[in-house]
Amino acid sequence: MVTPVVAGLPFVGSALGMAKDPARFFLRCYREHGPVFRVRIMGKTYTVIAGADAANFLNTREGRESLRSKEFWQGIVDEYGATRVISGEDGESHKELREILRRGYSREAIKGRLGDLVAITDRSIERDWRAGERVPVVRAMQYLVTDQLGSILTGIAPMEYVPDIRRTTLYILNVLVTRQRPKLFLKDPRYKRAKARVVELGERMAADYHASTDHPDNLVTDVMNAHVDNPGAMPAQDLPLTLTGPYVAGLDTVANTVAAFVYAVLKHPDVLARVQAEADALFAGGGTLDDESLRKIPSIRGALMETMRLYPIAVAQMRTATRDFDFEGHSIKAGELLYVGTSVPHFMAEYFPDPDRFDIDRYDKPRAEHMRSGAYSPYGRGQHTCLGKSLADVQMMLSMARLFHRLDLELDPPGYTLVTKTAPTPGPSMRFKVRVNGYRQA
């Protein structure tokens, strides 16, 4: 079967459509061309497989053996002078790294520390969400996420490094991963200074470990123990990239998601009322929080899941074909660069009726619309499914519960419609702001 090619501009190809709204772009192409098509972007051709079957393909043995991630992530490995990064490894190498990092990124890392998460969120509220001010939401969330991930996962909350982490992440993802910008951008002195600071942070974390004999059970300890016990698996040159990984991974992804959550909840007064009521009940009496507590906020959980459906961060997975294979009657050759459009079903009425509607009850039984095979992929699919997804769920639900419990927020202007960005990853514009009318709870 001949694979259709999406029409585009000379050389630029479909770059503009992708840049404006990649999720909707893939959906339109899927509707017009079917589950397999090709796009041209800045002189390169990419094959796209999209839809529920494509999402499920990543979970199969054939998918694991036919696709790899290395080419799309090798640039960041080379830039740091490292040997490998978990997002760019497959097979046994990926399993080895995943085992080293698994506990540090898991829900286990936060066990017994939900009160600490609340305290960090309160610290952020008092620092960045002052009554009467207009707050730039994404920026405030980036500082919150860095504080949380640093304090919980690594024992260091490097707030002074946040601008450097932001700039380094922006440049590396834009230039080396998504390739939306030319490599010339990496010569920018501002980027070079920021990257040097991030490397400095990683080296400082390693040095602090060696200088101490009291090592907490966290990600840094797991990584450094692996380095000491098996330097072949975790060599010294990989430490800066690996140790600062939580900040790079969370700063853009988690911050964008919770910023979109704030917008969506404030845009829907009925949802806002339910979120506030659950949040107030959760924190009533000031008792100890545990996993059972989190089961008592189904509206907040539903609002988070619906946010991740409508504003996905993982729009598509980037892969390279390792061998010739067939998908939906189309022949794909070894070496082809692919996008796997896992978010396409998020916007299809076949899976989510009235898909543009923010409906936080989609996920409760008996509806459970997300449970249809291949329908819902907020954290990616296959062996590269986000390692920290369970931790992120707790982090985001609890943070948003606390924020809406304590603050009286409104969109500014009240009828504001969200403007989004796509570089380096999809999310609300950095210009998105809300007004803090005051404090609901001290």
Image (spheres, rainbow, N blue to C red):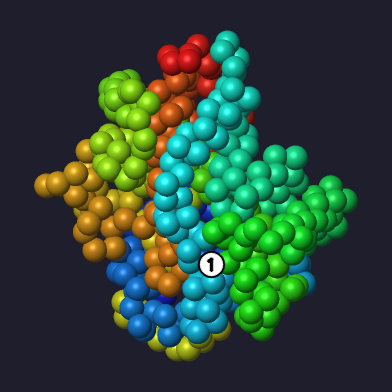
Q: Which residue is mark 1?
A: 101
User: Could you tell me if residue 207 is visible in this image?
Assistant: yes
Q: State whether residue 196 is above or below residue 97.
A: above
Please report the residue visible at 45 percent of the width from the left and 89 percent of the height from the top.
324
Up-down relation of residue 216 to residue 321 (above or below): above
Q: Nearer the viewer, residue 224 or 263?
A: 224
Helix, strand or loop status at disc 1: helix
**Left or right of 388, for residue 181:** right
Locate residue 375: give its quadrant: bottom left
Quarter containing the N terminus: bottom left
Can you say whether 26 is above or below 337 in the image?
above
- Residue 351 screen position, x and y as percent: 23, 53
Along the viewing direction, whichever of 224 and 325 lies nearer the viewer: 224
Between residues 112 and 175, which one lies in front from this camera angle? 112
Q: Quadrant of residue 344?
A: bottom left
Q: Residue at x 68, y 52 (%)?
A: 169
- Where residue 63 appears, x then y in whole percent? 39, 79
Residue that extends furthest to the right in the rendered view of this protein: 189
